[in-house]
Image: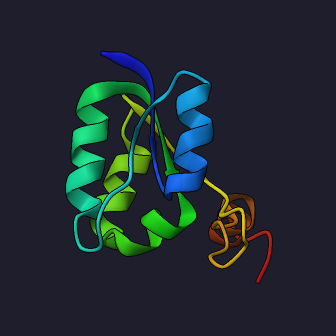
Amino acid sequence: MGAVVYLGDEICAAGYRLAGATVRVPRAGDEAQALAWARSQGELVLVSAVVAAAIGEGVLRAALSAVSPLVLIVPDPEGQVPVPDLAARLRTQLGLEA
């Protein structure tokens, strides 16, 4: 099992590949399948915000909350899809913010 798997666009995938990660550039509609594959291959799965936005919320939530492998959403370098603000969401759920 590889240590790090990256799912995202071709340009970022090239950089992650140079850093030693296993990469996959999923085709439109294949994002959830690519996530399932990545979770079976790595100990750390990095998913670009663009790919994460194309995965169903339930599937993505299950992957993010699983103990192993660790799944993280990384920012889109062009900033087209924002990364969810987990800290703000937690503060709202805890009643610290409205």
- The residue positioned farthest toward the bottom in the image shown: 98
Point out residue 23 in the picture as x, y percentages from the top left corner. Answer: 42, 38
Total numbered badges shown on the rendered structure? 0
Q: Quadrant of residue 66?
A: top left
Q: Name the residue located 26 percent from the left edge and 51 percent from the top edge.
A: 34
Residue closer to the observer: 94 or 48: 48
Point out residue 13 in the picture as x, y percentages from the top left corner. Answer: 52, 45
Point out residue 89 in the picture as x, y percentages from the top left corner. Answer: 66, 68
Q: Name the residue located 73 percent from the left edge and 73 percent from the top edge.
A: 79
Residue closer to the observer: 41 or 86: 41
Q: Name the residue located 51 percent from the left edge and 69 percent from the top edge.
A: 50
Residue closer to the observer: 46 or 27: 27
In this rendering, is residue 21 above or below 86?
above
In this rendering, is residue 33 above or below 78?
above
Point out residue 6 in the picture as x, y percentages from the top left corner. Answer: 47, 41
Q: Quadrant of residue 60?
A: bottom left
In which quadrant will I find the N terminus? top left
- The residue positioned farthest toward the right in the image shown: 97
Residue closer to the observer: 41 or 90: 41
In which quadrant will I find the C terminus? bottom right
**Colour scheme in use:** rainbow
In this rendering, is residue 94 above or below 22?
below
4 lies left or right of 25 = right
39 lies left or right of 46 = left
Q: Name the residue located 38 percent from the left edge and 53 percent from the top edge.
A: 25
